[in-house]
Image (cartoon, helix red, strand yellow):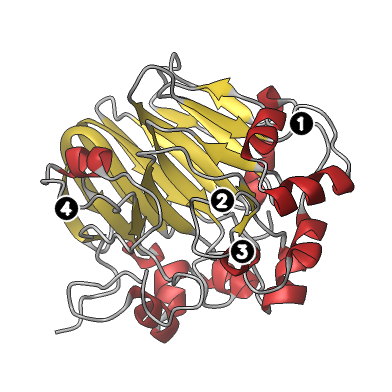
Amino acid sequence: MTVPTKNPIKLPANQPPQFYRGGAAIAALRGAESGKEFGPEDWVASTTTLFGQDETGLTKLPDGRWLRDAVRADPESWLGAKHVAAFSDSTALLVKLLDAGQRLPVHFHPSNSFARQHFDSHFGKTEAWIVVGTSGDDPRVYPGFKETVDRKTVDNWVREQDTEAMLGALNSVPVQPGDNVYIPAGLPHAIGEGVFVVELQQPTDFSLTIEWRDFLDSPEKGHLGIGFDAALQALDTSARDPESIIRRTAGVTESTVDLLVPGAAEFFRADRLSPKPSLDLDPSFAVLVVLDGHGALKTEHGGELALAKGDTVVVPHSAGQAEVSGELTLIRCRPPAPGA
């Protein structure tokens, strides 16, 4: 039986295979046993596949359909007419739970224009990290170069696989829950061991990995088949002040907290919701990640859904006006507003 599009839907874990370790924090959030050494990413409400794959990475709905196919069959109900006018039948969003059990390699992502030219894709891969947990002695992230670097130097690093130089050239920023980092296309970056994030990104899997040795099987997987000469044209080699892309919200106590710096709204939106005792929400396609507590989501057209820590929920636009209530904290992730 087809699940009515107007109903919010709870989603199970969806952890496609990855090359790096992690996943314990995802299991702890969801209240599950962690049996995966390489299950560091949970793709929530995903209409995106792993690079080069036909189905791996897609979210399957309880009625057996891929979410991607359900949205394509009824885009206005899922996404709303204005969104469809702007983005056709794409959700324009991928949400992940990402638990770095080891430091990730230095990499970057293409812009929309670069992705159109080299990957025949409307979307590049701008992303943002909402830090929701940390472990270990020194959790940190590495967003952008500390100083402007010339292209020849980067070419040499890639050719020699000089990990120490690559990582040493990046900003190194300690993080805690409540810190939120915006990663525009082209910005070189890495996530350190012990950092657990809710990640919002454009709906692609384009990662150009300049530190591929000891992480990937071959350099071809680092440049996604286009060659490093081409790939490095998308790299932002300029100096970046990390504070310009970080919003720190640990001490903010409002019921609704906009988590990302203003420039991110062109690509996605993220709010932390803490009902006191309830909050009204406008109609929107949304992905909810419940971080703590328990409560309920009541929608105008889709009934009421109990919420508890570890739940991940996809909400169609046609659910209408909504109210979230209870003693809980959740992240509401949305695509960009049409016309943003």
- Above or below, comparing residue 216 to residue 135 in the picture: below
Kindly report the distance in space between the C-alpha atoms of the residues bearing marks 3 and 4.
Answer: 46 Å
| Percent x, y of residue 172 | 61, 24
Disc 4 element: strand
Q: Separation of disc 4 and disc 1 at Cα?
A: 43 Å
Which circle, 4 or 1, is nearer the viewer? 1
Please tell me which of labels 3 and 4 falls first in the chain: 3
Earlier in the chain: of badge 2 and badge 3, it is 3
Q: Of marks 4 and 1, which one's residue comes earlier in the chain?
A: 1
* Front disc: 2 or 1: 1
Which label belongs to residue 219? Answer: 3
Q: Marks 2/3: CA distance?
A: 31 Å
Mark 2 falls on what kind of element? loop
Name which residue lies at 46% across and 59% down.
94
Query: Considering only vertical position in the picture, is 132 above or below 30?
Result: above
Q: Which residue of the protein is positioned furthest toward the front in this rendering?
A: 160
Question: Which class describes the residues within 10 Å of circle 4: few (<14), some (14-19), or many (20+)?
Answer: some
Residues packed near mark 1 inside 10 Å, few (<14), some (14 to 19) or many (20 plus): some
Q: Secondary structure at mark 3?
A: helix
Q: Cβ–Cβ below 8 Å for labels 2 and 1?
A: no
Question: Which of marks 2 and 4 precedes in the sequence?
Answer: 2
Local packing at callout 2 (Cα closer than 10 Å; few below 14, some 14-19, many 20+) is many
Q: Mark 2 — residue?
A: 268
Are there few (<14), some (14-19), or many (20+) residues within 10 Å of tag 3? some
